Image (cartoon, rainbow, N blue to C red):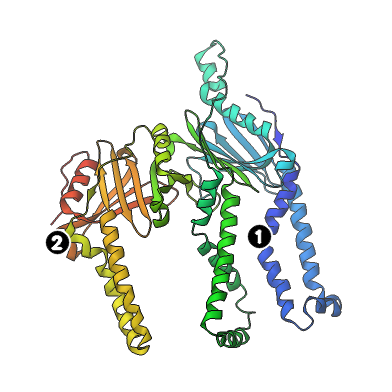
Amino acid sequence: MSKERYKLHPISAFLNFIKGLKELILPFIIIFGVNLFRDGGISSMFNQGWQGLIPVLIGSVVLIFLLVGGIIKWKRFVYWFEDGELRIEYGLFVKKKRYIPFERIQSLNYTEGIFHRPFGLVKVKVETAGSGKVGQAEAELTAISREDADRIENEIEKAKQHPTEAVFSEMGPLEYVEVPAKKVTTELYRMSMKELMILATTSGGIGVVISAVAIFLSQFSEFIPYDAIYEEVMLFLRFGVLIVALTLFFILLIAWIISVIMTIVANYQFSLQRDEDHIYITRGLLEKKKISVPLKRVQGIKVSQNPLRELFGYATVVVESAGGSVGDKDEKIRLFPLVKVSRMRPILTELFPELQWTPELVKAPKRSIHFFYRLNLVWLFPGIVALGYFFYPYGLLTLFVVPIIVISGVWQHRTVGYSLAEKQLTMQFRGLSKNRYYILKKRIQVIQVTQSYFQRRKGIASIHATIKAGMAGATATIAHMEKEDASRILSWYEPSGTKEVEE
């Protein structure tokens, strides 16, 4: 195996600088943002002599330090292949080495950012079965050529197809076998522009935008003049309900437009491919990402439909993969961000032929229907009474919440259900969106049955099934089912087949 040492592309030095700069954006904004509230604003810094320039000098030193650090990190980073391992060495004062056996490497995820594309480069994240923190790769090659990325794939395939040199020496001389050609991939799905627009307009990303703005503003809470803002708001409210409503409408409209643009940029040219061992997902406009998911690591499939998408026959499909996530925030791997249910099933059947995709569900009993809304009404009742009393008569409008909660509970009761096959458990439930889990028996980590005092009186129970997904796992719950159904699922799962739910 080649022991030639390879280096990253020089653009890595700049990318390391940009990465460090992104982490310091917030402190820089705070330092220079404070001066906006001073008399004279930013210009006042240059009227105070060298003392006023201290923030600028500190910022300049930090930028130079980041740039030099990025160059050093690039110069000291090398990788090579030896004894069936990907070996990486980096560090200046403390030299670090990382050896990753090829058999532990589960996938290579590619990212092409706006600085990679002009040079034909990719960022490679090496994912292993034992990757540590949430969303963190075992190793990351910041910028290498596509040819170098293919070389890593070829070395991994070569190592998995043939024994190492140490094994050859023990077994004696063997006839040389040519390494098989690169696996052929087949495209199964490509998102159309129509589906992309439907995804963007129904994604619910407006909440993400508003939350991001709120978090950003919270960082400057000490510098925000709340008294002045309060006076301006009270003055604005005097314009009347119509003006206030129109203003809120336009704010929400702008947030919605931003969320639509973000969704389109993130999922542009989404495609799904496969070979005999992996699923490959490619997406992105400004930053093109290619994610590989080993088929043997898939623990379960989750199909979700919000009410609007369910009405028009669309769904989102998520792969629950052991140790699998996207990015640094444990983002779930979406096999289909949005797809017609009729188009989805043939593709899922081809990918996972061992699963049944149209099972008959056992529903919750009629006597459990009030459990789906009773607790919510109990919690909200004191608030409804208080608002009705102190804000009479307008507070009585809160009574309209009661039928909404009841209707929502009835809807959840009609949705919940399960199906058992010899090797598969299917569980369906609803919050606002309908979710259905397809899980093979061998992938289930824990099945738990819970009963409250009131559930025991009615002879019903809730069933929870947990599979390995990410760091925390994923749990599907079907609430308020027959106690006999819980016993049946436990008996199906346990090898002895004799477990019963206790009275």
* Left or right side of 158 for 142: right
Find residue 175 and report its image quarter.
top right
* Left or right side of 12 for 429: left
Picture coordinates of residue 378, whole percent (x, y): 27, 74
Picture coordinates of residue 446, whole percent (x, y): 30, 48
Q: Foreground mark, 2 or 1?
A: 2
Which residue corresponds to the image point at 56% horizontal and 80% vertical from the top-left?
243
Image height of 361 relative to 216, above or below: above
Which residue corresponds to the image point at 70% horizontal and 28% vertical from the top-left?
4
The amino acid marked with disc number 2 is Lys
Find residue 306 and report its image quarter.
bottom left
Q: Nearer the viewer, residue 280 or 497?
A: 280
Label 1 sits on a secondary structure element that is helix
Q: Nearer the viewer, residue 191 or 172?
A: 191
Q: CA distance from mark 2 to mark 1?
A: 55 Å
Image height of 296 relative to 33, above or below: above
- Disc 1: which residue: 23
Quadrant location of the N terminus in the rendered image? top right
Residue 214 appears in the rendering: no
Which residue corresponds to the image point at 31% horizontal and 78% vertical from the top-left?
399
- Disc 2: which residue: 458
* Left or right side of 284 for 426: left
